Image (tube, rainbow, N blue to C red):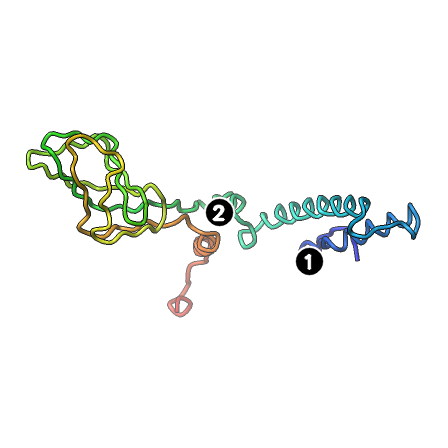
Amino acid sequence: MYFQPYVDASGLHLPTFQDIQNYLIERAKSIFGQDIYLENDSQDMQYIATVSKCIYDAFLCCQLAYNSQSPQTAIGAGLDSLVKLNGIQRNAATYSKVEVTCVGEPGTKIAAGVVQDTQLYRWDLPENQTLPSSGVLTCIATCEVPGNITVAPGEIQSILTPQYGWYTVSNSGAATPGVPTETDTELRARQNLSVALPSQTPLNAT
């Protein structure tokens, strides 16, 4: 049954989509008569369903705003804003890195070099690298995709930005994986620790 949204000791209460739609159907029948045709294939019913969806979406937006008042229920940007009050912020994602070996003509300059692994991930070389007199350059390549991207030894062999004098690329070791953006659950746990009361005795700490 439809009811006006309200807040009590247990939180925010909202009618469901079906409650809203049934209420609008009842109102339509009271205005146009009980014999009004309101099956799903009617224009009037389609209009009522559309209005019901808009009203329900607005109520859900109110629910998100209400939930954003507490770190335990806030999500996304709302949670980010709340934890700032405790002096912390969401940990950003980091990028995987791997040591690669470039072989080519001594003195060759590699500008904005990009290589690719067997999983089709792209790895960026540091800007403006120059092959030494040995023709072998070792440098750290950074994955273009943040997060836990792994690559095994020997999986980087493709040069995506061919340059004259640069012959091959390879990796003899595995990548050091990055980490994804801190999730809401992880951030809430860290926020809980940041406001935890210190132990007053050794017994309380166990």
Labelled pair 2, 1 in contact (Cβ < 8 Å): no
Q: Nearer the viewer, residue 107 or 88?
A: 107
Instruction: Identify the element where label 2 is drawn.
Output: helix
Q: Work out how far the residue at label 2 is from the one at label 1, CA to CA, in angstroms.
A: 24 Å
Left or right: 157 as drawn, with respect to 204: left
Q: Earlier in the sequence, mark 2 or mark 1?
A: 1
Give the position of the C terminus as an image quadrant: bottom left
Please identify the quadrant where the N terminus is shown. Answer: bottom right
Label 1 belongs to which residue?
Answer: 9
**Residue at the image point whose x is 91% and y is 49% from the top:** 30
Q: Residue furthest front?
A: 41
Tell me the crowding category of disc 2: few under 14, some 14 to 19, or many 20 or more residues within 10 angstroms, Cα based. Answer: many
Q: Identify the amino acid type marked 1.
A: Ala
**Residue linked to disc 2:** 83
Q: Secondary structure at mark 1?
A: loop
- Residue 125 in picture, x, y percent from top left: 24, 37
Q: Position of residue 156 (x, y in %)?
A: 23, 47
Observer-nearest of 137 and 117: 117
Type of amino acid at the residue the image marks with label 2: Val
Give me the residue at 13% from left, 39% from top.
103
Vertical arrangement, residue 39 with respect to residue 167, above or below:
below
Residue 160 vs residue 54, the one in the foreground: 160
Percent position of residue 140, x then y: 21, 42
Number of numbered discs on residues = 2
Can you give x and y, in whole percent of width and height, for residue 138 in the image?
Answer: 15, 41
